[in-house]
Amino acid sequence: AACGAGAPQTTPTPAGDPVAGQAAYQTTCIACHGPAAEGVPGLGKDLTTSDWVASQSDADLLAMFKTGRPAADPLNTTGIDMPPKGGNPALTDDDLQNIVAYLRSIHK
């Protein structure tokens, strides 16, 4: 018999804590992306329905949150700089991973 034949398929457990991520989101991201992550016109995109968010790996989102996205970046469609860590240097890598988990939990 083949190794693993008949074994149930498992989905990897996402890293991060969405509850802690919501709290971290509320301290920083809310300013541009709104209290429900549905965006603020002229500032931040709706993260709940973003095809871009859905297409990125957790590692890619984490990397983007750490480096930000300047207004000159062709992928920046707002014309507004997204500073590294949303402008909050106190956010740790764990905080950012938790924000990723939170966004995954609310994405429609």
Image: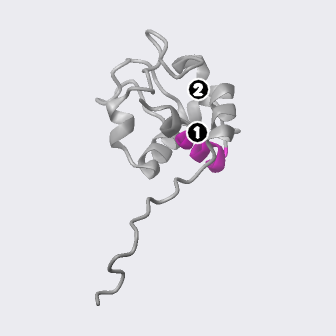
Q: Determine which of the numbered discs, if any, sits on residue 89 in the image.
A: none
Q: Nearer the viewer, residue 11 or 19?
A: 11
Q: Is residue 19 left or right of residue 99?
A: right
Question: Does residue 95 show up magenta in the picture?
Answer: yes
Amino acid bearing label 1: Ile
Task: Give the vertical position of 99 relative to 93 (above or below).
Answer: above
Dot 2 and dot 1 residues touching (CB under 8 Å): yes
Q: How packed is label 1: few (under 14 Cα within 10 Å), some, or many (20 or more)? A: many
Residue at 58% from the left image edge and 47% from the top image edge: 97
Residue at 33% from the left image edge and 21% from the top image edge: 77
Residue 47 location in percent, x, y?
Answer: 45, 27
The residue range painted magenta reads 92-101
How far, Cα to Cα, is label 2 from label 1? 9 Å
Q: Is residue 61 left or right of residue 94?
A: left
Dividing the picture into quadrants, the one containing residue 1 is: bottom left
For label 1, the residue is: 99
Q: Is residue 84 left or right of residue 107?
A: right
For label 2, the residue is: 29
Question: Does residue 29 show up magenta in the picture?
Answer: no
Determine the main secondary structure of the stretch shown in magenta: helix
Which of pointers 2 and 1 lies earlier in the amino acid sequence?
2
